[in-house]
Image: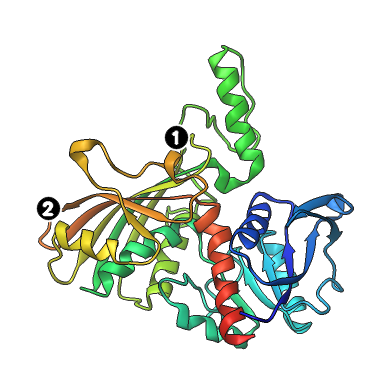
Amino acid sequence: MSREFSVAVVGATGAVGNEILRVLEERQFPVKELRLLASERSEGTFLEFRGEEIVVEALGNDSFGGIDLALFSAGGELSQEYCPVAAAAGAVCVDNSSAWRMDPEVPLVVPEVNPGEIARFRNKGIVANPNCSTIQMVLPLKALHDFSPVKRVVVSTYQAVSGSGQKAVDELRIQSGELLNGRPIECKVYPHQIGFNCLPQIDAFLDNGYTKEEMKMVNETRKILGDDGIRVTATAVRVPVFYGHSESVNVETTGKITAVKARELFAAFPSLEVLDDAAKGVYPMPVASAGEDLTYVGRIREDESVDNGLNLWVVADNVRKGAATNAVQIAEILAEKYL
């Protein structure tokens, strides 16, 4: 790739924004100019990129002049407001929030699964990055779906606190220390204690009894796989882990897929790594996924309660592949094929 690009990172001082900078540097994305944008309270601070200190600017309507790519990770409200501003200025937006995911004119992309959808960015100048828990689940689902169509998915997630941002990471760390020392704790980020506890609620509850997080997984999975007929049900749980989401996934396919065949399909699929040797205690764990871009799948076994069912355990770093890396991969395809 010979051309270089002017890139803006919106929400650069946040956890995902910081990770986007690391991934851009690690993957040697051809950055000509880097513009770091955040709230006014971060204006004037500095972040490092490729050994250079770059000043953070306040996000505004005039922030996108001359920008080719804008990587957004600043929350849904700001994305809803500023993605159209950036697109009108000529930038292509890759948005990490939920603001545009279910817009029928905006592609929702996991590059290993549906890269051809990226071409639809021309509709609004936006490509949506899926929910972190959806990204890691659709990778193994796609491997199975291409062999024998997926009919039904039952998923339970075990999601790290970093999915709620740095303040949640700090809350778990502080609560753990206080509890171990027999001192009272404060709950600021979550409504209940997260240290040494599990919370069966991620995001707000809806009228159907599911949370927004759970319904994101339902709707986004269908959109990414391009099949509204897939039945998906989800239970999302916050667990006292710093980084790395885990998922127990039960999949029912149209035809029989043995556990042996499933391992072959996963091993051949990009960005998936099979860790599945029960006799040796080999299986995916969040502590081993932290800082990695791969999605790990293990505990692969046939569901003895249905004819064409499989059980999987899927783990990935929610800040890397679940957010920053997926966004940069989208940007790479945009840069290579469309800009």
| Amino acid type of the residue that numbered disc 2 sits on in the rendered structure | Ser
| Residue 292: percent from left, percent from top | 48, 51
Task: Tell me which corner region of the image, top left, top right, bottom left or bottom right, holds residue 100.
Answer: bottom right
- Horizontal side of 51 relative to 327 (left or right) equals right
Q: Is residue 300 above or below residue 7?
A: above
Label 1 packing within 10 angstroms: few (<14), some (14-19), many (20+): some
| Residue 311: percent from left, percent from top | 23, 52
Label 2 packing within 10 angstroms: few (<14), some (14-19), many (20+): few
At 60% from the left and 18% from the top, the residue drawn is 178
- Mark 2 or mark 1: whose residue is earlier in sequence: 1
- Horizontal side of 255 relative to 50 (left or right) equals left
Say which of 138 and 82 sits in front. Answer: 138
Say which of 77 and 139 sits in front. Answer: 139
Question: Separation of disc 2 and disc 1 at Cα?
Answer: 28 Å
- Element marked by disc 1: loop
Q: Which mark is residue 198?
A: 1
Quarter of the rendering occupied by the N terminus: bottom right
| Amino acid type of the residue that numbered disc 1 sits on in the rendered structure | Cys
Residue 231 in sight = no
Say which of 2 and 119 sits in front. Answer: 2
| Residue 227: percent from left, percent from top | 34, 77
- Element marked by disc 2: loop
The residue to which callout 2 is attached is 305
Quarter of the rendering occupied by the C terminus: bottom right
At 27% from the left and 72% from the top, the residue drawn is 145
- Residue pushed farthest top? 182
